[in-house]
Image: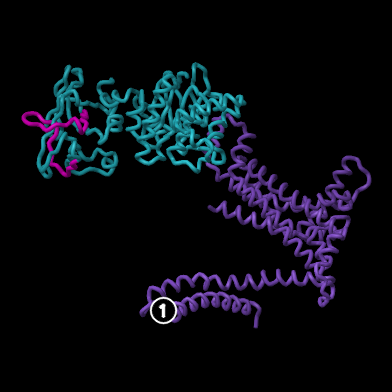
Chain colours: A cyan, B purple
Amino acid sequence: MADLKLTDVKKAYGNVTVLEHINLDIEQGELVVFVGPSGCGKSTLLRMIAGLERITAGTLEIDGQVVNNVPPSQRGIAMVFQSYALYPHMTVRDNMAFALKIAKKSKDEIEQRVSNAARILQLDPYLDRLPKALSGGQRQRVAIGRAIVRDPKVYLFDEPLSNLDAALRVATRIEIAQLKEQMPDSTMVYVTHDQVEAMTLATRIVVLAGGGISQVGTPLELYQKPQNEFVAQFIGSPAMNLLPGKIVETGDRTVIEMDEGGRAVSEYPTTPEDQGAQVKIGVRPEDFVAAEEGDYIFEGKVDITEALGEVTLLYFETGEASMEEMEKGDAAVIAKLQGVHQNLRGQEVRLTAEPSKVHVFRNGTSILYR
Amino acid sequence: MPVILQGLITILIGVGGCVGYFYLSNLILDRFIFPAKGENIGRNINRANAVRPWLFLFPAMFVLGLYLVYPVVGSFVRSLYGRNPNEFVGLGNYISLFGSSDFQTSFFNNFLWVIIVPAASTFIGLVVAQLTDNLSWGNLAKSLIFMPMAISFVGASLIWKFVYANDADIGLINAIRAMLGFENPIDVMQIPFWNNLFLMVILIWIQTGFAMVILSAALRGIPEETIEAAILDGANPWQLFFKIKVPQIMATIVVVWTTITILVLKVFDIVYTMTGGNFGTEILPSYMMDFMFRDDGRATAIAFVIMIVVLPVMIWNIREARKEMR
């Protein structure tokens, strides 16, 4: 049970820098989730904390002690792997007891800790089975049990749900949340590329991109006040719409004239220097509402509608989009309207949003965080 | 007719014959015996499909029967007769074999070979496979260790004849002895009992490469995460190797071990070339050679004993190899 501190951590393979300037404080009892697109270095960062990868520069402290050169097993951490990494030749009991046997714990203590972990994870009936006789979800529980018996200061999870099917993933996610409830003092670091896992489990989320930290914050902070365009589009599904415009009024409220016509009002405050600045406004699909009269932010022809019952998704034509834009997902403007809206296809629709839901980004960064 | 032409024609006839057999027999089955038309079309197709595997298996089974099963039975029958093929002696050959001290020596020596050579080859191969895995020049080392595999047993024996030569100017062993200050060279092939071990060294030298290559591949097949998990669990390199890696490749180890065991039971070239079975180094195959063409009854009896000893190892080997494949 401890806090974790990364100071200016860097990882490079030869001349290729993968991660740089990683500064992060994780407090005891937190469940911190690393998210990011594939290849952003989130697993590498976790493996550096585990001690499976060397730290090129900077320091890693666990419980106030620098552990850069401490072997993995003495760092007081335990890790759960994506592929479970169970020892195939050992029974569930032996898998869980292995670390304790290596540490030369007494037989009674091993027995007591293993049965305790088995009880928490409901693995009692399977203790004498080999991993190959277990289902995917059970295997992952054994892997978690192997971490629990060691009573580590920090739990590390490396995409633990990625190998499970959709239904099991939800069930196991809830189990991990419950496990965290049962052990409120334990510190957990969790890597995933699934933002739903991140949003539901995390005390705080660390968004990694481009070799560094994009933003650190609680799930709702990231959703409500994204620090930059990347986080804005990464968190939330479908991704936030970004539309170009120019600031025409500054002050406690900002008014933006859209390049495509239309006006947006945002609660983001601006200074007179911002007058005339080229910006992008961000509106989440679910924050768009149909504009009855007067100002609108966006006007367009509905290309496709998807009626999901509770909501209706509208996809708008936005002229010619480059391949690059298509891949990044900001080709089409998407609106998510509550309820059922029929016969909108091919029609011109005007959309607007509450000023509090309109985000303003200048040069890729939210003007809230200047 | 030039020899090369003869060879080519033979190959053509052989391969063409095979293709022709499979094609024609299949055709006959489908067109004439169970034609896929007429009243019983469904039944005919089912029957043809039931017969087809046997049709295709037949040549292999026939040839195996002719060259494997028949000789086994024939040998057994022959072993019941004496030196004179018309003189029936029953189990006489076997009884006199087990009473002979030479046979007992070679049986005991063979037992030592079977225990020591596979164990040493597999163990050294495993250790080498593990040690060379993380070396930058590991592949070079592996190539060197694998090379003896390419040498025939007789060739290898000749090389080791030099190593063991009874002369400090030629023999490595005696050169080392001379360096350490011993005056007279010795013939290591004449030291009772130990000479057996010196002979085994030759086969170990040859077979370690085989074990190393197979086990090296198996070691690389172990999922990296299980090793990382064990490192996190605090296992030291020693425990990592013996408690995590070795158990995961146990099936492969058994296959390598039994394969070498079977080979050991067949080796006679090394003993024949090095000592000719003298000085108490006789093993069953070389003992068999002593009687061949002189007392075929006795020789086939020895061959039969060898077969019975190999059989269980063979069965185990095939079982493990099958398990491995699953």
B231 or A248: nearer the viewer: B231
Q: Chain of mark 1?
A: B
Q: What type is the residue that disc 1 sits on? A: Pro
Does residue A318 appear in the picture of this structure?
Answer: no
Q: Dot 1 surroundings within 10 Å: few (below 14), some, or many (20 or more)?
A: some
Q: Secondary structure at mark 1?
A: loop
Side of B281 relative to A97 (left or right): right
Measured as percent of width and height from the top left, residue A51 is found at 52, 28
Q: Residue furthest right?
A: B183
Does residue B186 appear in the picture of this structure?
Answer: yes
Q: How many marks?
A: 1
Residue B106, above or below A9: below
Side of B179 relative to B268 (left or right): right
Measured as percent of width and height from the top left, residue B144 is found at 68, 49
Is B206 magenta? The answer is: no
- Answer with the quarter of the image where residue B99 lies: bottom right
Q: Residue, x 45% and y 74% (percent of image)?
A: B48
Is A296 magenta? The answer is: yes
Q: Residue, x 55% and y 43% (percent of image)?
A: B222
- Answer with the quarter of the image where residue A101 lies: top right
Side of A126 relative to B103 (left or right): left
Q: Which residues are magenta?
A: A279-307
A307 or A121: nearer the viewer: A121
Q: Residue furthest bottom?
A: B1
Looking at the rendered image, the quarter that the N terminus of chain B falls into is: bottom right
Q: Residue, x 52% and y 19% (percent of image)?
A: A66
Q: Residue, x 45% and y 28% (percent of image)?
A: A120
Residue A59, above or below B207: above
